[in-house]
Image (cartoon, rainbow, N blue to C red):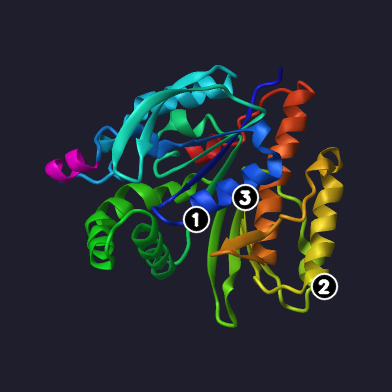
Amino acid sequence: MARPIMLGIVGDSASGKTTLSKGLVRLLGEGSVTHICTDDYHKYDRRQRAERGITPLNPECNYLDIMAQHLQCLRLGEPILKPVYQHHDGTFGPLVYVAPESFTVIEGLLGYHTDEMRSAYDVRVYLDPPESLRRQWKVDRDCSKRGYTTDEVLADLDRREPDSEAFIRPQRRNADMVVCRMENRDDPFVLDAELTLRDSLPHPDLSPFVEESDGLITMDERDSECQLFIPGALPRERAAAIEECIWDRMHFARHLRSEALGEFTVGNDVHRSESLALVQLLILYHLTTARARVSLGEPEVDDHATQAA
């Protein structure tokens, strides 16, 4: 069997990693994906971190050596015994046996911290929302799902800020794609997206659609990267034309087409964002083209050499 295709999704706490990961797992098919969170590799539980005055963002608070070893095992198609960190109470559960499927999605805080870890991925994504929006997402999540008060979450954010600056944000430079989803003034549930697409991966040419979008989509090409802005409220017919162009380039993966592309839930309500749909589709494009190359036995090329340097 061809080796698994490895996707990394890195970002600060509450930057949208799990939302994006779960959406991609749903699109790829749960039976075809191994989904791992690197938070499981924390050294200390919540009580021990408080006693030591250390945050989970600090590399010293994580077994990065074991994490790197496990990433390389998964890339080779080998199973691992993975630790489990339980966010609901901040303790560790029993180890679980994990066998890699066709795709492996790894999300977490420090996934690109070392050269060995970075080299395990075929596609590297970094989530970089505006800090004000990330803080709001963290307050909403930790208060509703993890039992914290607003004051506790805000105090924790302040404690973590030095480590965010020192260890999390520098990983942005190691990504093939940086995704910044920002609030849309007209619709709080439909976020705009600004993407940084680096030439460490061959991205599909979207320039014809930028020219035809009447200024709704903008693109700024620089030395080794491209800045692409996609409004969340992009008219459906324009978004559909771009999606069709990308699907045409991944004709070998048209079985993945789904009405769930770009969908997300708020409470019990299902919404759709055209910017989210295109972000998901661009990531799917790279995953499926990597899958095709590996399946055909094409030589492995270190497209990430410049990023790891």
Callout 2–callout 3 Cβ contact below 8 Å: no
Could you tell me which residue is drawn at 43 percent across and 46 percent down? 171
Q: Nearer the viewer, mark 1 or mark 3?
A: 3
The residues bearing labels 1 and 3 have C-alpha atoms spaced at a distance of: 11 Å
227 or 57: which is nearer to us?
Answer: 57
Q: Which mark is residue 201?
A: none
Image quarter where the N terminus lies is top right
The residues bearing labels 2 and 1 have C-alpha atoms spaced at a distance of: 30 Å
* Residue 176 makes an appearance in the image: no
In primary-sequence order, the first of circles 2 and 1 is 1
| Magenta-tinted stretch | 46-52
Callout 2–callout 1 Cβ contact below 8 Å: no
Measured as percent of width and height from the top left, residue 197 is found at 62, 54
Q: Nearer the viewer, mark 2 or mark 1?
A: 1
User: Which residue is label 3 attached to?
Assistant: 23
Secondary structure at badge 3 equals helix
Could you tell me which residue is drawn at 73 percent across and 78 percent down? 215
On screen, residue 282 versus residue 55, left or right, reads: right
- 47 magenta-colored: yes
Could you tell me which residue is drawn at 29 percent across and 42 percent down? 90
Return the residue found at the far bottom: 186
In primary-sequence order, the first of circles 1 and 3 is 1
User: Which residue is label 1 attached to?
Assistant: 16
Image quadrant where residue 302 sits: top right
On screen, residue 297 versus residue 307, left or right, reads: right
Crowd band around label 3 with a 10 angstrom C-alpha radius: few (<14), some (14–19), many (20+): some
The three-letter code of the residue at mark 3 reads Gly
- 68 magenta-colored: no
In primary-sequence order, the first of circles 2 and 3 is 3
The three-letter code of the residue at mark 2 reads Glu
Q: Which mark is residue 212?
A: 2
Is 111 situated above or below 70? below
